[in-house]
Image: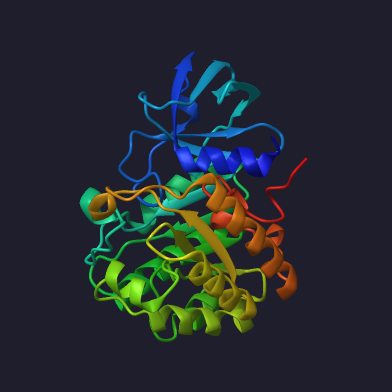
Amino acid sequence: MDWPELKARLLAEGTVRLTGKPASRYQSSSTAGPGAGTGGSVFFSCGRGRVRLAIDQNSSLEIVHLGSGRALLKAWNLEIGGRLEPIALHCPGQAYITVTGGCIYRCKYCEVPAIDAGRKSPEDIEAMVENVRDNIHSISLTSGMLQSVEEEEEYVIKVTGRLQRFGLPIGVSIFPGKGTAERLHAAGVTEVKFNVEAATEQLFTEMCPGLSYRSVWDALEDSVPLFGRNHVFSNLIIGLGETDEEAECCIENLCGRGIIPVLRPLNPARELSGFSRPSAERLLRLFAFHTEALSAAGLDPCRALTMCLECTGCDLVPGRDRAE
């Protein structure tokens, strides 16, 4: 079994039992993203790549921590040696921070409003980065929305101003308004991720009531000339009810505009708790299409410096996840 196939099967399961020696330094909890609201997660790597799995003691998969990060993954009658990776902030090698851990909107798949973890001050965020600065190579910021699109953007820009002193690339993922890309670029942000989330506007409107699909596309198109190709990204959630053809069309539309899609397997939560995670077979089919679409557009995820494409834990990433 090559690495993309193994990772697809792991992402389709999504969870793992963690046994063996104490592993607290390798466990992470999240207030945003696929692991939000769960009992924590671990990053397992085996030389070929990295995958992030939520910890669930009822999972059919098992990781045995042998000590000092050495680990054994037991799945499908396989035993695969590897390592649990130490977490900086949220993921290995990055300070990936949720600025506002609450939101006035109620996207059906998102746990952030339910968790409502509050807002971190610029001073607190700067101190968090300072505490891990020797273990990171980039800073990534994501955020819910406390009051409005405009107020959240202004607050995140204030935070980025405090973080410039570290001299590290900064990636930002927020919901954009008119002119957001220009203002983030002027503030010294290195990369941006504005999320189309759903493969079609109809599905987006159903899943994210009150938010504008067109605003996201406009911001993405504005971003490419500013940040450059290979430095503008967009999450596309797989499993919201889209067909493969709709997903492929969205992938082609993003790539054709110089934007790298991040194909994010659905984590069934909140109003979508009755949904299923996408199958490994579907993830592999779309991974193959994604790989070809990126190549045809001359885009390379390996050049990403921040956020999800640099981490790769939650998604299959062409160029970074390779068969070996």
Residue 47 falls in which quadrant of the image? Answer: top right
Whether residue 188 is visible, yes or no, is: no
In this rendering, position of residue 95 left or right of residue 123: right
Viewer-nearest residue: 139 or 40? 40
**Residue drawn at point x = 39 percent, y = 44 percent:** 35
Residue 158 in which image quadrant = bottom left
In the image, residue 230 lies at what x, y percent? Answer: 66, 69
324 or 114, nearer to the observer: 324
- Residue 285 at x, y = what percent? 60, 56
Measured as percent of width and height from the top left, residue 287 is found at 62, 56
Measuring from the top left, give residue 190's x and y in whole percent. Answer: 59, 68
Left or right: where 307 falls relative to 210: right
Is residue 2 shown above or below 319? Answer: above
| Quarter of the rendering occupied by the C terminus | top right
**Closest to the observer: 284 or 33?**
284
Say if 219 sits above or below 144 in the image: below
- What residue is shown at x 44% (from left), y 80% (from top)? 180
Q: Is residue 210 above or below residue 323?
A: below
Colour scheme of this structure image?
rainbow
Residue 171 visible in the picture: yes
In-image side of 107 versus 52 (left or right): left
Viewer-proximal residue among 147 and 230: 230
Q: Residue shown at 43%/70% (left/top)?
A: 157
- For the N terminus, which image quadrant? top right
Quadrant for residue 48, please give it.
top right
